[in-house]
Image (cartoon, rainbow, N blue to C red):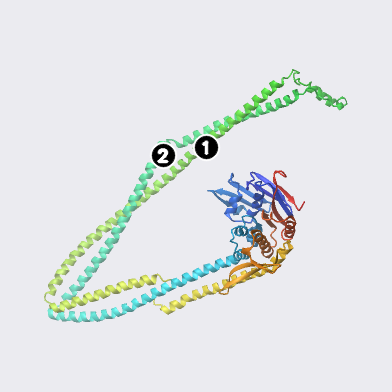
Amino acid sequence: MMELELQNIGGFTGVHTFEIKKGINRITAPNAKGKSSLLRGIQCLASDDETVFRDSLNDDNDTGSIKLDDEFVRNLRRTNNIVQATPADDRTFFDENSQWRNAEKIAFFTPKSRVVLEIEQNMFDVLRFVKSVSGAEIVESDLRRKEAQLEDAKQKLDEYIENLTNAQKLEAEIKTMQGDIQKLQDEVQELEDEIAKESGTMDITDVSKDLATKKREITGLHERLRVREGEVKRYQDEYEKAHALRERIDEEIAEFERTYESPEKSIEEFKGNISKYERRKKSLKKGKDLVDSLLGVINEAYKMFGETERVIPDEASEIPSLDRAYNLLGEPRECPVCSGGADRDTLDQRRKELRECATDLSKDMRGEDEQIKMIKADRKELQDQVDGLKAKRRALDGAKHDAEEYRKDWDERKDTLDAIEREIAEKESELESLEREYKDATKTARTESRDRLNEMRKKVGGFENEIRNNQKQIDRLTSEIPDYRIGETLEEYARKKNKGLEQLRAEIEELEGQYDHEVRGAVKLFNDKINDIYHDMGFTTFRDIKIEEATTRGRPSSLDVIVEHESGKKQSLSSLSKAEQLTLGLVFQISAKENYIPKFPFFVIDDNMNTFDPDRFKLALDYLTDKADYVLVSQPASPSEQEELVVRYGFE
């Protein structure tokens, strides 16, 4: 025997306990009296589904629990309209045995079970059921994930190969252009020699080199200036943000301190008010207890004084203590204390007055409770605001520190910026001097040679620019390719990456084989048992039941159930009546329990067997008692037969 304790589960408010005995447990009650609530409590011990938790926890409470003996427990809590379990404190069926993780899908045949819901909606999928209870569903999930990884890896590899191909084409172009540059530089050297001979000096060449150097220096300085300007602007923006944050927090702190000049004092005042109302409540409670005590006395006096005569037992003459007791009671309608007369109407009026007084005191006590709650809420709100003020002060200190740091960085970078601008001005002045020298030196050179020289230099510069652009493009393309080594050929890289793809393909093939093995193995297990289960439970409509497989590319793509009547007529599952489909659904779940969780101690049926005739119902339950230690089934009862839920054991 096991004791099931439910707290705030379904229609049960507070703690309710039930005894579950080995064998058949019939949960009988009128509608809306807790049959499904009791069964859902047990289901919670086998579920991690938030929907089951939400349907189980009482709507009027935010916490609840299910306890089965001291062995299994599940605690539920509602937070932000979401009901969750607390695994750290729970002990569930699948904690006891990991093979019981599918128990919810197999051992619970209820209106909200997946099998029942799919049959009701004409959407029952045999393959999906077989996969979910056999473990093939997990294998299929891994298979789909591996297939997606393979497809993604293939797509990325194609992109990498394309980038690598483009990079290698650019490298070939760079080598060609470098050869052209070398030829042009040779021609430039020849022209410079000719110009030097004609002008009688090499000054023009030297000045030209100095001129190019200065231009590069100025370009570099301009680039540094641009970077520094960006840094200065960024730190200026950060400083302004930090400064604005500091001002805003200052204003919030000032506003709060104006509103609450002394929040700590206000909190103490709240505490004083709470103490005052608690004292008042205590006084009211004491007064109510006194009134209740007096009311008890008056009630007893009302009964005693209402007697017209008092029968004294014969034993009173033999037992002195009994005789003395009746003497102390006095005569009917006479006070046992003062022997005065008693007025029944006066006593009744005093009882009414005392009840009204007790009611008024209770009402006042509730009023004091409400006042205490309101004051505590106001105190908490003020305390939260005080805590927020402290957090804002800490944030203000941080904002002040950040603003000061950004200000220092801004000043330092501004100084660097000014120095770079001065250096640029100096270099530009030197450049002007060099350009004048170059102009003077080239006056003596032949115009034709000079033009050819400039044209070649432009070509060289164009090639160099193109080489730099191509190199940047190569760097961009190759930087996006993982595991790529500079200088590695396209074939080497593709061969290396294909090894990873082959590993994924091998894993996919292994998972496909495992999936086929799980599904086909499960189909064989079901086909070996479902006919015996069906007939042993007393059903005779079908002569033979068989799961048949449809394949696509050698893999199971769908499963259907084919039933054969005594006449030889065959039908698929979808063409059967709802009652016949539900019967087969129950047979499938029982077969799944025998095949996958034979030692799971429970099998639960809620409302789904109420359409069976009594003899077949008894045969089905008798069969189940050999497959589960505890069989729980709900049965409706009319309100005229019984008012509350009752657990009955076996058959009466």
The label shown at residue 28 is none
The residue that appears at 68% across and 27% down in the rendered structure is: 295
Q: Nearer the viewer, residue 414 or 368?
A: 368
Q: Amino acid at mark 2?
A: Phe
Q: Residues within 10 Å of mark 1 (few under 14, many from 20)?
A: some
Q: Amino acid at mark 1?
A: Lys
| Labels in figure, total | 2
What residue would you read off at disc 2? 256
Q: Position of residue 10 (x, y in %)?
A: 62, 48
Drawn side of residue 175 relative to residue 67, left or right: left
User: In the displayed structure, would residue 363 be above or below residue 405?
Assistant: above
Q: Secondary structure at mark 2?
A: helix
Q: Nearer the viewer, residue 203 or 626?
A: 626
Q: Position of residue 210 (x, y in %)?
A: 20, 71
The residue that appears at 40% across and 36% down in the rendered structure is: 258
What residue would you read off at disc 1? 376
Q: Quadrant of residue 186 in the image? A: bottom left
Q: Quadrant of residue 124 in the image? A: bottom right
Q: Position of residue 436 (x, y in %)?
A: 14, 69
User: In the displayed structure, would residue 521 be above or below residue 194?
Assistant: above
Farthest top residue in view: 340
Q: Secondary structure at mark 1?
A: helix
